Amino acid sequence: MIQRIFFDIDDTLFPTSEFAELARKNAIRAMIEQGVQESPEYLYSVLMRIFEKKGSNYSKAFDELCVQLKIKRPARFIAAAVAAYHNTKSSILPYPEVPILLLKLREHGYHLFIASNGDAVKQWDKLIRMGIELYFDDVFVSEEVGKEKSKLFFKRVLKQLKANPKECIMVGDREDADILPAKLAGLKTVRIRRGKYSKGKTVADFEIKDLRELEKIVANL
Amino acid sequence: MIQRIFFDIDDTLFPTSEFAELARKNAIRAMIEQGVQESPEYLYSVLMRIFEKKGSNYSKAFDELCVQLKIKRPARFIAAAVAAYHNTKSSILPYPEVPILLLKLREHGYHLFIASNGDAVKQWDKLIRMGIELYFDDVFVSEEVGKEKSKLFFKRVLKQLKANPKECIMVGDREDADILPAKLAGLKTVRIRRGKYSKGKTVADFEIKDLRELEKIVANL
């Protein structure tokens, strides 16, 4: 019988990739509004090359964009881009079924957890901005666990919770970071097919397209 | 005859000190909402001591606050505090008379400029968030001018604009950073009496309590 449900965050609880793209496009629109004389398509392509080279969390991307555009006094455009980017990123919404699902699962007595890679403050920021942080008994982020999501990550988490892996299920979109490591640690697994990692084979026990299906899956286990 | 009007930003165009205090208080409320077991008054006093010690722009103030509170897993509270802080800071509004005054001055043919100390991106961010950036012919921030507001700062700016100081007027709240240096460079000066620097003697040509009075002052010069 399942007692504990672990969720990934990005592209599992909210459409990370969509919001990232929208934030970048809004930033570019803001730069053009402030006077940059280039097409949005061109600016977007230059920006994407910067993120490809420096990583998608590169914090000086708009500074670098202004350098590549040879803008002499870039402060105005950096300020506009960063403000528009953060305004978009700070209004993230969960997938629409998420809040009510989490509430129902809690009502049914399940203990809910986050199991996520990344920076602990950034992942907490997402949960708080989505307004769903109170549903979780605890939040395990790789930075604090001391290990990227892997068999050992889940072993450590389960040990801390004094939990039997057979009573646990992991829900995530990525085969490499969610399904395989959780399975190796003995948890049941649910692969959610959405976002940019939606394709490819899976060894997950269940595959779903929408988190609403999760309620039945855990009830039947 | 006055042709160019220079404005300071902080506590001249918007109530900087009020927003800073509100942002800090909202950050503390958010930490308590997430479970910190202390009174808002106590947290605020600890936070203020951190800012006094490290400077009011210290970016790790909430990390440091969690250290002093001996919080073991601080990510949740840092994320909540920083989000609330930035949400407040990102919704700054100008003093209510500012937008219509700037529009009228432009209609009367005056050229408007910003003369501000600080980081260029941060100052542009404030103007853009207040929605008043288009009223200004140019924005001079000490970081870009290469000099804190001083006689030399204004000399450089006037040289760049090929402007006669007698046709220029500076409006600001601070005797040291606005009035004295502008006067030494030969500009007319207006001291606005509000914010935390509202007290003290002045050598300014005019003293006002509300920017609406500026319209008549420049018309009569």
Image: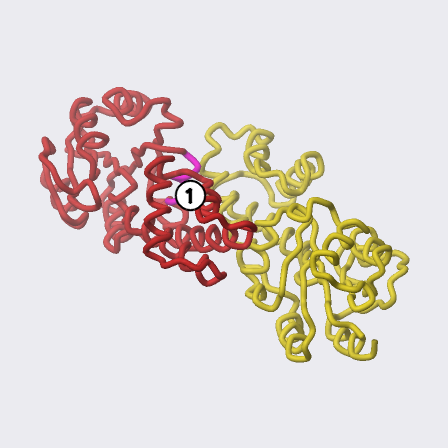
Chain colours: A red, B yellow
Work out whether residue B212 or residue A143 is closer to the camera in this orientation and state it. B212
| Left or right, residue B143 beside residue A150 | right
Rate crowding at label 1 as few (under 14), some (14 to 19) or many (20 or more) other CA atoms within 10 Å. many
- Which quarter of the image is occupied by the C terminus of chain A? top left
Check the image and report above or below for B39 versus B179. above
Check the image and report above or below for A14 versus B219. above
Work out whether residue A36 or residue A102 is closer to the camera in this orientation and state it. A36
Q: Quadrant of residue A5?
A: top left
Work out whether residue B219 or residue B198 is closer to the camera in this orientation and state it. B219
Question: In x, y percent, where is residue A70?
Answer: 48, 48
- Is residue B124 on the magenta stretch? no
Q: Which residues make up the magenta segment?
A: A120-126
Question: In x, y percent, where is residue B51?
Answer: 67, 39
| Left or right, residue B216 beside residue A149 | right
Q: Quadrant of residue A125?
A: top left
- Which quarter of the image is occupied by the N terminus of chain A? top left
- The amino acid marked with disc number 1 is Asp
Kindly identify which chain the residue marked by label 1 belongs to.
A
Q: Which residue lies at the image location 33% right of the left edge and 22% below the top edge? A: A147
Q: Which residue lies at the image location 60% right of the left edge and 43% below the top edge? A: B39
The rendered magenta stretch, by its main secondary structure, is classed as helix
Question: In x, y percent, where is residue A50?
Answer: 37, 41
Check the image and report above or below for B31 versus B68. below
Give the secondary structure at mark 1: helix
| Left or right, residue B186 beside residue B159 | right
Residue occupied by mark 1: A125
Work out whether residue B119 or residue A46 is closer to the camera in this orientation and state it. A46
How many labels sit on residues? 1
Q: Which residue lies at the image location 56% right of the left edge and 38% below the top edge? A: B62
Question: In x, y percent, where is residue B201?
Answer: 90, 57
- Residue with the most extreme front position: B162
